[in-house]
Amino acid sequence: SPAPGGGSSRHGDYLVADADNHRIQLCPAASPGSDCTTVAGTGSAASAPTQLNGPKGVAVTTAGDYLVVEQYNHRLQLCPAASPGSLCTAVAGTGSSGSGHAQLNRPADVAVTAGDYLVA
């Protein structure tokens, strides 16, 4: 089981939610200590579709895309694995904290089950 804030890609590489650097890193399992690649986020905290703010968790969908939990943007983003750095889509949360049915308040992690998303 992956550590909190991380996951693994469909190819066994490691996904790391790099919260303080506002990005998701893909690190090669076959080459420990090698450089990682940024697959989501720009390294700057913001709320645009290509930016992240305090990502806390990441999971891989059955299609191989990345689900990213953003603690400070109060949302769950779906980021395409096929084109790293491209626009992500908010699939849960409104970007504002709250307790309404469509809102999240500092989500911490995500899991994928049979096509659905579980957000903690």
Image (cartoon, rainbow, N blue to C red):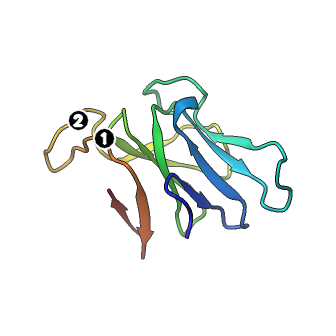
Please state the horizontal and vertical placement of residue 39, each as a whole percent of the image.
66, 43
Residue with the mark numbered 2: 97
Q: Mark 2 Cα within 10 Å, few/some/many (few <14, many 20+)?
A: some
Residue indicated by mark 1? 106
| Residue type (three-letter) at the residue carrying disc 1 | Arg
Q: Classify mark 1: residues with Cα within 10 Å, few (<14), some (14-19) or many (20+).
A: many
Which residue does the image show at 76% across and 44% down from the upper left? 36
Residue 114 in the image, given as x and y percentages of width and height: 42, 76
What amino acid type should be assigned to the residue bearing mark 2?
A: Ser
Please state if 23 lies on the left or on the right of 32 as rendered: left
Q: CA distance from mark 2 to mark 1?
A: 7 Å
User: What residue is drawn where x is 60% and y is 63%?
Assistant: 64
Q: Are marks 2 and 1 in contact (CB under 8 Å)?
A: yes
Dot label at residue 94: none
Q: Quadrant of residue 30?
A: bottom right
The earlier-in-sequence mark between 2 and 1 is: 2
